[in-house]
Amino acid sequence: MLWLIITISAHILNALVFVLTKALLEKYITNEKVFAILIGILGLAAFALAPLGLTLPSFLNFTIDILAGAAFVWALYFFYLVLKKFDASTVVPVSGASVPIFTFILSFIFLHERLSLREVMAFGLLIIGTVVISLAKSKHPLSWKAFYIAVLSGFTFALSYFLTKFAYDTHDFVSAFVWMRAGSLIGALVLLLDSKARAATWMIVRKTSIKVKISILGVMALAAAAFVLLNWGISLASVSLVNALQGVQYAFLIIIVILGNLFLPKLIKEKIRGWALAQKILAIVFIGGGIALLAFV
C-alpha cells in the first residue's frame, strides 16, 4: 500500500508541474533545453545522500546508471520541445501513453517477454486513446511532427524507467539514485554544447528578476519531489504498476487546467471546453484502461 500512496502523490505533483512548466515556457523560457538543463544540474544535490551509503557499482551497473539519468534529461527536452507550443492536456497523455508501450517493447527485446491477449487489448486501448486525444479540437492542435516528438519523449522516458528499474534491482537505492543523477548532469552538459541553450540558461540564471527565479526554483522543487517519489515507487513495485497510475495524472491535469481557467486565467491560458473536453476525457478513459490492463497482467 505504501508504494501506491507514494506513486499517486508523484503523479498528482507531476500534473501540477506540467501545467506550471507550460506557463513558464510560454512567459519566461525562450529555449526548450533550459528547463531540462536546470533539472539535470539540480541532480548534483543528490550527492548530499552520499554519506547514507554511496558505493561504486560494477562497470556495467555504473554505465546503466549514467545512461538512465542522461536518458531522463533528454526525455524532458523532447517533452518540453512539444509542451512549449501545444496544450499540456494533449501532450502529456500522448507522451505518457507511449511509455508503457515502449516499456513492453524493451522487455520483449531484452527480457524475452511475450504479449498475452490482455496485453494486446491494452495496447489497442492505448493507441485508440492516443489517436482520440491527438485529434481533439484545440487552439493549438498537434502537428504530425509534434506528435512524433511527443512519442519520442515517451520512448526516451520508457528507456530511462527501464534502466532505472534494472538499477534498483541490482544495487542499493542510494547508490543507484546518486549515480543516475550524475548521468542527468552529463545529459545536461551535452545539451549545453548548444550555444543558444547556453545563452538562454545564462540569461535565466543572471538576468531574470528575483520573482521569475523563485517561480522557476519553486517548479523545479516540485518536479524534484515528484521525481524522488516516482523513483521510490519504482524501487518498491513494478514499472508497469507505477505506469498504471498515470491515469490519475491525466485526470488531475484536466482538473488543474479547468480550475486554473477559473481562478488563474492569466497564468493558465489553456482552455478545455465542450466537445474538446469530452474527447479528452474519453481518451483518458481509453489510456487509463489500457495502462490498468498492463499493470495487472
Image (tube, helix red, strand yellow):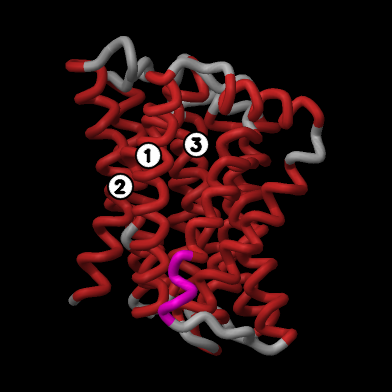
| 164 or 155, nearer to the observer | 164
Numbered circle sitting on residue 13: 2
Q: Which residue is drawn at 53% across and 58% down?
A: 99
Relative to residue 48, is residue 27 depicted above or below? above
70 to the left or right of 246: right
Within 10 Å of disc 2 (Cα), the crowding (few <14, some 14-19, many 20+) is many
Can residue 222 be seen from the camera position used here?
yes
Q: In which quadrant of the rendered view does residue 210 lie?
A: top left
Task: Where is residue 74? Give x, y as percent.
Answer: 66, 49
Q: Give the range drawn in magenta.
A: 48-52
* The stretch drawn in magenta includes residue 1: no
Q: For the view shown, which residue lies furthest in the top direction?
A: 266
Residue 17 marker? 1
Name the residue: 27% across, 48% down. Answer: 12
Indicate which disc, 3 or 2, sits on the residue closer to the N terminus: 2
Q: Main SS of the magenta segment?
A: helix
Task: Mark yes or no: residue 162 visible.
Answer: no
Q: Distance between the residues labelled 1 and 3?
A: 14 Å
Placement of the N terminus among the 4 image quadrants: bottom left
Q: Are marks 2 and 1 in contact (CB under 8 Å)?
A: yes
x then y, percent, for residue 217: 42, 35
Which residue carries the number 3 mark?
A: 91
Mark 1, other Cα within 10 Å: few <14 / some 14–19 / many ≥20:
many
The residue under label 1 is which amino acid type? Val
